[in-house]
Amino acid sequence: MTENFDEIEKRIIKVLDDFLLEVEENKYVGNKIWTNRLKESIGDLGKELEHEVAIGGFPNKFEREWLYDIVWYQEDSENRLIRTPLIVESEWSRNYSGIKYDFEKLLIGNAEKRLMICQSEPSQVENLFVKFKEAINAFEENYNDRFLIAILDSVTESIFHYKTFTKIKRN
């Protein structure tokens, strides 16, 4: 089955795929450099799309981090928050309990889109997608919310696997 990604999701996926090329080209090693460059790349896309962006660690480029690893937001002329197009959590631990903790922050968030970035052994990618889908369906709020999940193949570190899930209200 082919995923039906919307235009924003396609742009996020391109940023993530381009990031992997940058990692290979620059031989980045270690979670800190990976995390910082990945956050900066997603933040740059948010700015390109004319959103305000909150990410920790970039005081001269983005607003400071609040609530989530990355937040794209918009304010009105009175500096009141009017919308959050995207919230992002990332977790490089391969331990599901760490991934679950960060993912659950997205479940309770109020945003147009949510992005979870994590990694897994290739043999566990589909199982992790199932766990995300089950968590989304078990959560009793936020119907019609859209989640983009990006799981890095932790063995090759050269490919993300992507799926979207939308919470549908049960009758």
Image: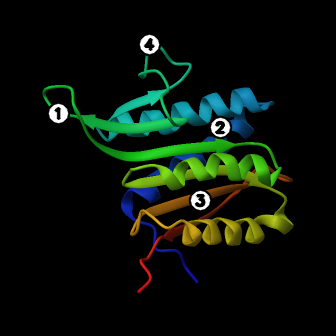
**What x and y, as percent, mark residue 99?**
72, 50
Q: Quadrant of residue 63?
A: top left
Residue designated by label 4: 60
Q: State which tag comes first along the sequence, 1 or 4.
A: 4
Mark 3 crowd level (few <14, some 14–19, many ≥20, 10 Å Cα)? many
Task: Give the CA separation, mark 4 to mark 3.
Answer: 29 Å
Q: Secondary structure at mark 4?
A: loop
Q: Earlier in the sequence, mark 2 or mark 3?
A: 2
In the rendered structure, which amino acid carries the disc numbered 4? Asn
Q: Are marks 1 and 2 in contact (CB under 8 Å)?
A: no
Residue placed under numbered mark 2 in the picture: 22
Q: In front here: 48 or 144?
A: 144
Mark pair 2, 4: CA separation? 22 Å
Element class at badge 2: helix
- Please give the residue where the numbered disc 1 appears in the rendered image: 76
Q: Residue at x 61, y 70 (%)?
A: 133
Q: Give whichever of discs 1 and 2 has the lower sequence position.
A: 2
Q: Secondary structure at mark 3?
A: strand
Q: Do callouts 4 and 3 mark residues in contact (Cβ within 8 Å)?
A: no
Looking at the image, residue 101 lies above or below residue 121: above
| 77 with respect to 36 (left or right) | left
Identity, as a three-letter code, of the amino acid under mark 2: Glu
Discs 1/2, front: 1
Q: Are marks 2 and 3 in contact (CB under 8 Å)?
A: no
**Which mark sits nearer the N-terminus, 2 or 4?**
2
